[in-house]
Image: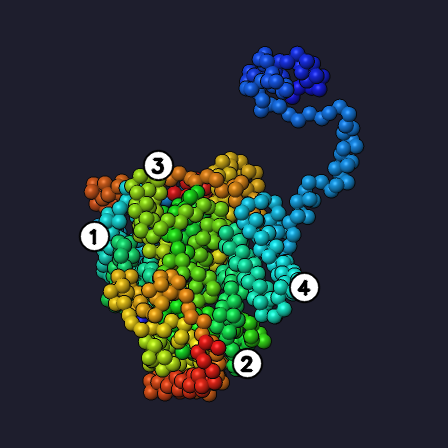
Amino acid sequence: MRYATAVNPPRPTSRSTGTGAGLSVAPPRSKRVLITGVGRFWGANLARQLERDHALDFVCGIDTRDPLGEFGRSEIVKGDIRNPAISRLINVTRVDTVVHTQVFGADRPGETSRTLHDQNVIGTMNLLAACAASPFVRKVVIRSSTAIYGASPRDPAFFTEDMEARAPLRDTYSRDIAEVETYARDFADRAPHAAVTILRFANSIGEQVDTAFTRYISGQVVPTHAGYNPRLQFIQDTDAVDALAHAVRSWKPGTFNVAGPGTITLSKFLRMAGRIQVPLIPPMLGPILHTLERAGLLYVQSRYDRTLKFGRGVSTDRMIEGLGFTPEYTTREAAEKFAAWIRTRRYHEGAESHADRELLDYVQRKMQQMPSLDAGLFGRLTPRFDPDRAGGAQNGDDDLATSGIATRVRGDAGLDDDVEDSVGDDLGLTLDDDDSAE
Amino acid sequence: MAPTTDDITAATSVGTCQGHTRSGARCRRRAIEGSMFCALHADQAQPTMPADIDRDELADAIADLGGPDDNASASGTGTGSGTHARSAGPVDELRQMADYLGENVGRIRDVAVGSGIVDDGLLERILADCAHALHGLAQAVAERVSGDYEEDDFGFDEAFTEHLLPLATLLYRYWWRVDIEGIENVPGTGRGLLVSNHAGAGMPFDGAMIKTAMFLEHSQPRHVRLLVLDWLMGLPWLADLMKQTGQVLASSPNAYELLKRDQLIAVFPEGVKGMAKPFSERYNLQRFGRGGFVRIALRTRTPIIPVAVVGSEEIYPKIANLPIVNRLIGAPFVPVTPLFPLFGLLGAIPLPSKWNIEFCEPIDVSQYPPEAADDRAFVLELSERVRATIQERLKANLLKRRTPFW
């Protein structure tokens, strides 16, 4: 059984992971990878990580958005996965592994859940159809979300992968996710030679990732539901990319939650980050968030409405034992790191020289060690969302209309970029902060 | 910018303003009577030192006093103020208040006894316990407001719970005067599953008293994690309070998760049926669900400790239901008691019945294989055995009680 569909409750004493069992020959190793969604954090950084891996022959990235940041030897294509010509791309490049990260919730001005629904669901359907038609594709990794579990007062403290949402999913994004997973299962049934790894990610937080959720919790004033203090779960942005890379490098068919172990309550996090929490009576938060969205002041979608009321925790046991992936940061540690960064962010943005950045890194580490430090001094500026810096979705649509499938954006760029990147890593710095932060 | 002493003496006689205009020039307006500045520049007035005071002598004198900083920390008494002495906000005030109350608990008792107001030990103890409760409450609020708290993966804040415990102790000692039997049957460490009868028309006071008993009476005080009805866990504020004090939603994944972490949990297999039963059905145990708790115990090899609670049936003697209201607010049921809703919120005060809680001999399930959990008949049989034990102990303890109220 490749899919763990056991409905029994989890057994604390012993539990079979149901992954990779019964494999008689060594699983094929990924050589050529196609990554969707390189216009956003996850796809782009996965491509950058994989192109440094010399065990891989070829890395190709595709997105309707402009690619995010600079790439080395990756072949970056601007195109739409809803176009049936994606099949030709897969066959021509003979990719054996497809990493599908292009399943997004609306979190930019100009994006609506309806336009994204089309991209998410139809795009996935088309991509998986192309994978099924290809004789080469041996592995498909899907970036799903823990939003599939919904949020309700009847939720267990920790959802395991076998559980389903306790209440009907209300918002478009969670329903998209559910549909995407249905297509993925369907593909797994029809292509038994291929391994399908579905990774259900908790909310990513970190310095580099920029979503409606990270903007919401790092706002200077954070409206919340009065009387509700949800338990939240995070995954550090770098861990999220590592999890995807891990799935590419290993052979682990199945569904896995990916989150930092443990949970943290919203008010505790806001305290650590020095944000001002404004509790609003339950029927008011929804409309207020909606109004702020409309006014362009805050891009937290109403899709977080129920999560911010009832919270959500997922079990990470199968991720650690079955997938064999342990994130560097627990939820608590990721939250502490992010909170420290929020507090010093305004100084990061102003930092020009290398020395400035080193100093700030030091300050940030100190603040992380002492989260009770008064936030009054540091956490006083909310960054404005800059639409110019974000890749707009509309451009991609135009491209689709004119070209067959793709416009080639970048080709090989030699080794220099690799060296530069690794130097940056060694220093523990993000050298082109502004560019990579979407 | 500040005028020198010479300037001031000169100007006082002349009577012009000593202030400077915004451009930096000397103001030429007349000073107000008895002042050295005009109305516009009154804010530029600085306290000046009379000429007959030697600055060095003054500095020495101040140094002898210890300086203003030391004074502040001397007044900030108690334990909690050390780290927060820097800024004085409402939270620090609250902390100070908490510490003040804490220090005075003993003194209140001494004064009450010494002055002869109280010669009976009871009132003295009540006073002391009230002061404890207030102390705890103030500390709990201070911690929450300052954000200086820790919580586990379920949202449980141990320190917060312990601060609120003195409040529950008041109910435990003086309102229901709870008697305890067999508390040593509960393991002091490791996992354990308490199974109790349930009553009390919606409010989980029986659970609260079991929690309090485990903390007050056990040789190794520990927190009991109650598994609570889903409707209660959806209520604003109340659900949060329950999560903070260690409760979780009643569902088997949660029970497994808690037992995996070697916690002591308590379940009420009667569920709503137990809470909603009318007065005529008092102390008659309802059906024990479908034996889910037995399956959990078998799979996790957790000892089952039956608990018989006497007294909880009389706190809200239920005579009828309000089906229309309960449909409106989505509650499982809304009870009518002789006092509620007739007397409004006052009618919602639980009656002060006399309680007895007996913790029975643990049932060791480790003698059965974990696979026994899949044997439905065996599970139901074991569940029935637990139910019979509780029913039998309830009857015996009811006979021992002289009247429902003392």
Name the one closer to the observer, B106 or B80. Answer: B106
In space, the residues marked 4 and 3 are separated at their CA atoms by 77 Å
Q: Which residue is drawn at 61% across and 51% down?
A: B81
Q: Which residue is drawn at 46% across and 46% down?
A: A275
Give the mark, 4 or 2, whose residue is nearer the N terminus: 4
Corner quadrant of residue A255: bottom left
Q: Name the residue under label 3.
A: A388
Regarding mark 3 in the picture, which secondary structure is present there? loop
Q: Mark 2 points at which residue?
A: B184
Give the crowd class for mark 3: few <14, some 14-19, many >=20 residues within 10 Å: few
Is residue A344 in sight in this rendering? no
Between marks 3 and 1 in the image, the one whose residue lies nearer the viewer:
3
* Residue type indicated by callout 3: Asp
Task: Check the residue under mark 1 and report the chain it is in.
Answer: A
* Residue type indicated by callout 2: Glu
Name the one closer to the observer, B136 or A148. Answer: B136
Regarding mark 1 in the picture, which secondary structure is present there? loop
Name the one closer to the observer, B260 or A363. Answer: B260
